[in-house]
Image (cartoon, rainbow, N blue to C red):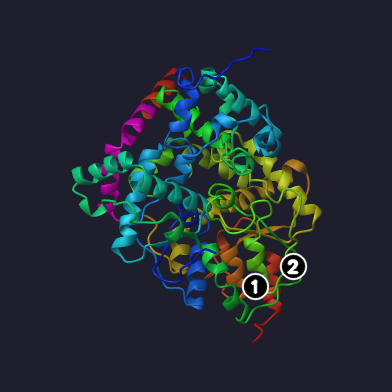
Amino acid sequence: MKKIPDKDILIFKSCLISGEYPGVESSTKYLFDKLGVEYVVEDRQSCCTGLGYYYDLFDQYSTTALAARNFAIAREIGHKNIATMCSTCYAILKKSCNILNENDKVRNKINQIFKDSKLDNLIYSPGDMDSEGNIFHVAEVLWSKKAEIKDLPMIDLSELKIATHHACHYFKVHYKEDSIGNKRNPLLLDDLANACGTETIGWYDHKKTTCGAGFRQRYANLDLSLSVTADKLMSLKENDVDILLHMCPNCQMQFDRYQPVIEKNLNTKFNLAHLNIAQFLALAMGADPYKVVGIQTHTVSPDKVLEKIKQASPVAV
Amino acid sequence: MEFKTIKIGKNNNKLTDSIIKDLKTSKDIGVLKCIQCGMCTSVCPASRHSEYDSREISKRVLEEDESLIYDDIIWNCFYCYTCHSVCPVGNSVSEIIQVLRQKAIINEEFEQIVTFLAFGESLLELGIGSIPIEYYSELIEVIGNDYPEFKNKLDEIREELGLGSLNLPDEDVKDIGNILEKTGFKDRLEKIRAYKKSINSEQ
């Protein structure tokens, strides 16, 4: 069983969360505050390069050099337990960490760059970070606090039909090492929904299918991209799902921004809204939908959840 | 049907060797262990919806078919790693494709990535990536006017949510620029920029 920390955490900023769904970051902070998880957010931390990496623009070497820089900053501020909100950050950082620990040639070359740039403070020594012991997804930190979550007062959202979308770069990339749960039927998000008293529909056709963003595909090959997204949306429609829970801003963007487009293309209606798991948990705990959860940046408004929140007052335990 | 025996150590497996040793691939990647079972294709979104076929990619790699590097079909992969997560012998077509595309780029085939230039430029300018600018107007067209409206109010919304600055301090952006210059990334961007200019002037 892997040990998930609840202190010395650096919430690792994500470019898509910062620019598309900033409410995921504020919801994460809200939850960590409630659950007593000690964390910081750091201005100097850069993007992981992930989107550029998977647009094939970034080479592994450049990506690893920037990871080494971010790792050094995390260590310097005494918060070397990284918790990512994006599954691509998660996969990219783990990969870079393994390279820095295991590949002497690449590490030495990167360290030489730091020396030549008078950035000696960034120099990486093997073992400075541990891919399994220091790099986590925020959902994992929340998962480790299930018992505490169960004890908190919660708005009853159990009448909603909930399904989960486990991001590919969380459960398919480093699955051999340490992703939580079964790669054949991932349940990390289902467990978290259960912790706040809501059932999920569990398995559904296309549960494991990718969101369809496909990095370049969403832009360079939109029809191909949306046909994959539609597979999943049609399955969710058959199951009358109200809310799809996410753990990656790229997936959330694909579904939330493009759902109306797919509705138009297929001449159908999906009565489905999209929330990151941190947004969902924060709403269930009574967080303000606009001032904390940031739903004003969503394309599809989660009206059914808002209605439930309006009806209910928090139940004291 | 053509049969070919792979003779290990005879240096006639240049492509497979270079893929296995590439920094982008997992250190235990099972390229040579592929048994053509087709599990990868059965779960692949690109194989389901296009001419792309994961198993065929793996086969052509084993056949040392270097024309794959210049075959447009490799650009259909979604990088969802579903193939990677189900392969019974630890092969990863997803990682193979990443290496093939890098080979194309190293050979200055920029056609497929030129539109993503803006991501690199944004990273160098602000320290964070951004949506390719070429697609921004397309996004507004498909998503609607609410999209640019909230984007214009982003700073205000972030402030209301109690979040910090979107961009990195100038000093840090400078450091990142220095690092990316020395890794060769700036050079790569420069080449792609020149390519973009050349195709624009042709039009």
Residue lying farthest top? B2
Q: Position of residue A208 (x, y in %)?
A: 68, 49
Give the total of numbered labels: 2
Q: Position of residue B163 (x, y in %)?
A: 43, 65
- Identity, as a three-letter code, of the amino acid under mark 2: Leu
Mark 1 residue crowding within 10 angstroms, few (<14) / some (14–19) / many (20+): many
**Left or right placement of residue A279 versus residue A134 in this view:** right
| Residue in the picture at 45% in, 63% down | B158
In the picture, measured across the screen, residue A117 lies left or right of residue B21, that is: left
Residue drawn at (32%, 51%), measured in percent from left and top?
Answer: A126
Image location (x, y in percent) of residue A301 = 65, 61
Image quadrant where residue A190 sits = bottom right
Classify mark 1: helix, strand or loop.
Answer: helix
| Nearest to the observer: residue A205 or residue A250 | A205
Which residue shows up at 37% across the image and 60% down it? B165
Report whether A313 appears left or right of A5.
Answer: right
What is the C-alpha distance between the residues marked 2 and 1? 15 Å
Task: Find out whether residue B120 is within the magenta segment.
Answer: no
Q: Amino acid at mark 1?
A: Ala
Q: Which residues are magenta?
A: B168-192
> What SS does tag 2 mark?
loop
Q: Is residue B150 above or below residue A143?
A: above
Q: Check the image and name the residue furthest to the right.
A: A238
Instruction: Say which quarter of the image contains residue A294.
Output: bottom right
B125 relative to B9, above or below: below
Label 1 chain ID: A
Q: Residue tagged by mark 1?
A: A195
Q: Quadrant of the C terminus of chain A?
A: bottom right
Question: Which mark identifies residue A160?
Answer: 2
Q: Which SS does the magenta portion mostly show?
A: helix
Q: Is residue B53 visible?
A: no
Answer whether residue B176 is magenta in the image.
Answer: yes
